[in-house]
């Protein structure tokens, strides 16, 4: 190894050799105490002479100086907007790294001493930007709407509130459906899914499809079960166009069966809901 190359040392090797943490080495770099070179995929190297000259100072640094933004929010009671404003205004240094939990996304690391040195200033920043405020208002209004659409189910013995992503909620929110009509639809859907055998029976395709319908769709087969079994057994030997043809036939039969099961159990749900006194008028 040449004298020139020995003057430089890898960041990780430097931490190990001099009894430091990588964060302490990083902080020394941030403060300008160590000359360094970023070699890309090969990592960062630091100037050994700088490190040895400032070793006592570097050892006095906190062993940890980096913190994930989400962790900083929890630890210091800050909002995302407050930290992002601090980053934009240069109060907190940061770097983007690979997300340790989601390999396809990035994460932000912040410098802890920067946060702590400017904490009171950062806490004075607005907690939410206008976009966040609008989202919170929207969430509040939609929550109120879901509250208006809830109903008491005597069979469950509790109140039932529609899910956030309910199509009925979206329809009412967009003024495409009245509150009364929405509640009726939600009651029927709840009874169909929870108080009838719909979810189980809709998968019994042959219960809802006649033999002649199967033969018309897939000549040579008398039931959905036979068609599915044949496809599963021989699909690896089929050409792509043959697979697509069988899948299309299977899906067509399944759609028809589910539609009929839904119609049947909707009537059953309607009857049960009326018997429980939840619906007074005929379904429209």
Image (cartoon, rainbow, N blue to C red):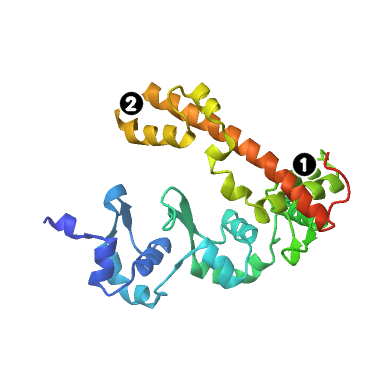
Is residue 32 rendered to the left or right of residue 166? left
Q: Which is more toward the observer, 142 or 214?
A: 214
In three-dimensional space, the C-alpha distance between marks 2 and 1, rounded to whole angstroms, equals 44 Å
Q: Residue at x 60, y 32 (%)?
A: 256
Vertical placement of 189 versus 67: above or below? Answer: above
Q: Secondary structure at mark 2?
A: loop
The quarter of the picture where the N terminus appears is bottom left
Which disc, if any, is residue 238?
Answer: 2
Earlier-in-chain disc, 2 versus 1: 1
Vertical placement of 110 versus 240: above or below? Answer: below
Q: Residue at x 84, y 45 (%)?
A: 181
Q: Position of residue 142 (x, y in %)?
A: 77, 52
Q: Position of residue 227 (x, y in %)?
A: 43, 32
Which quadrant of the view contains residue 254? top right
Q: Residue at x 29, y 71 (%)?
A: 53
Can residue 145 be seen here? The reply is: no
Task: Check disc 1 and report the residue beneath it.
Answer: 171
The residue sitting at the right extreme is 281
Q: Position of residue 146 (x, y in %)?
A: 77, 55
**Nearest-to-viewer mark from 2 and 1:** 2
Is residue 100 rendered to the left or right of residue 15? right
Q: Which is more toward the observer, 98 or 145?
A: 145
Can residue 231 be seen here? The reply is: yes
Q: Residue at x 66, y 51 (%)?
A: 193
């Amino acid at each position: 190894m040449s004298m020139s190359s020995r003057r430089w040392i890898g960041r990780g090797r430097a931490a190990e050799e001099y009894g430091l943490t990588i964060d302490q080495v990083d902080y020394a770099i941030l403060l300008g105490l160590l000359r360094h070179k970023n070699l890309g995929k090969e990592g960062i190297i630091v100037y050994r002479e700088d490190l040895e000259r400032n070793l006592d100072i570097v050892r006095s640094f906190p062993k940890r100086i980096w913190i994930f933004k989400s962790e900083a929010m929890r630890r210091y009671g800050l909002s995302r907007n407050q930290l992002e404003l601090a980053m934009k205004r240069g109060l907190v240094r940061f770097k983007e790294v690979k997300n340790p939990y989601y390999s396809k996304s990035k994460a932000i690391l912040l410098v802890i001493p920067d946060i702590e040195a400017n904490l009171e200033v950062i806490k004075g920043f607005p907690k939410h930007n206008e976009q966040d405020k609008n989202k919170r208002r929207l969430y509040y209004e939609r929550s109120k709407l879901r509250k208006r659409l809830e109903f008491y189910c005597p069979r469950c013995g509790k109140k039932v509130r529609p899910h956030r992503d309910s199509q009925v909620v979206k329809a009412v929110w967009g003024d495409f459906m009245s509150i009364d009509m929405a509640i009726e639809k939600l009651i029927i859907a709840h009874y169909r899914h929870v108080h009838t055998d719909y979810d189980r029976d809709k998968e019994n395709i042959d219960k809802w499809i006649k033999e002649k319908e199967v033969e018309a769709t897939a000549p040579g087969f008398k039931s959905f079960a036979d068609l599915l079994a044949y496809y599963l057994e021989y699909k690896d030997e089929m050409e792509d166009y043959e697979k697509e043809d069988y899948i299309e036939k299977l899906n067509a039969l399944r759609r028809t069966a589910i539609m009929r099961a839904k119609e049947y159990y909707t009537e059953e749900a309607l009857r049960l809901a009326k018997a429980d006194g939840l619906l007074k008028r005929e379904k429209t």
